[in-house]
Image (cartoon, rainbow, N blue to C red):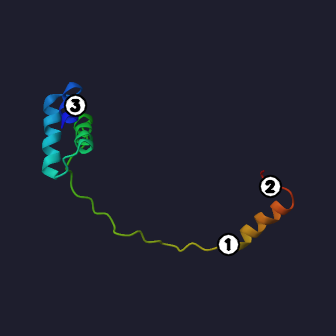
Amino acid sequence: MADILAMVLQHDEQAVLTAVELALAEGVATKTHVLNLLHRLVDGKVIGGPPLDTPQAIALRREPKANVERYDGLRAHIIGGHHAS
């Protein structure tokens, strides 16, 4: 609580108060969250915008294919003395 009150020394009092009110409304009353909201307010970023519709899982369009010949070719270079170390 003291750290949040001390934010008034570096930021506008009304901005700190707004950040605290937003944090309490969201149910996350931590210093980190209040500081995050305060920086968003100061930077002019959107707070409480529309919810994002994100997919629950990422789907592959094309399955990866193992290319063992490629690795066999790399091993041939190592045996021949072309190793990086």
Q: Type of residue at label 1?
A: Asn
Please state the horizontal and vertical placement of residue 59, each as a whole percent of the image. Answer: 43, 71
Dot 2 and dot 1 residues touching (CB under 8 Å): no
Quadrant the N terminus occupies: top left
Q: Residue furthest front?
A: 2
Question: Is 18 displayed left or right of 73 in the figure?
Answer: left
Q: Which mark is residue 7?
A: 3
Earlier-in-chain disc, 2 versus 3: 3
Q: Which mark is residue 83?
A: 2
Residue under label 1, please give it.
67
Of circles 2 and 1, the one toward us is: 2
Please state the horizontal and vertical placement of residue 22, each as a whole percent of the image. Answer: 15, 45
For label 3, the crowd category at 10 Å Cα-Cα, with few meaning under 14, some 14 to 19 and many 20 or more, is some
Tag 2 secondary structure: loop
Please state the horizontal and vertical placement of residue 7, each as a whole percent of the image. Answer: 22, 31
Residue 41 or residue 50, whichever sits in front: 41
Question: Is 67 displayed left or right of 81 in the figure?
Answer: left
Quadrant housing residue 69: bottom right
Earlier-in-chain disc, 2 versus 1: 1
- Residue appearing at x 12%, y 50% in the figure: 25
Alpha carbons under labels 2 and 1: distance apart: 21 Å
Q: Residue furthest top?
A: 9
The image shows residue 76, relative to residue 28, as above or below, that is below
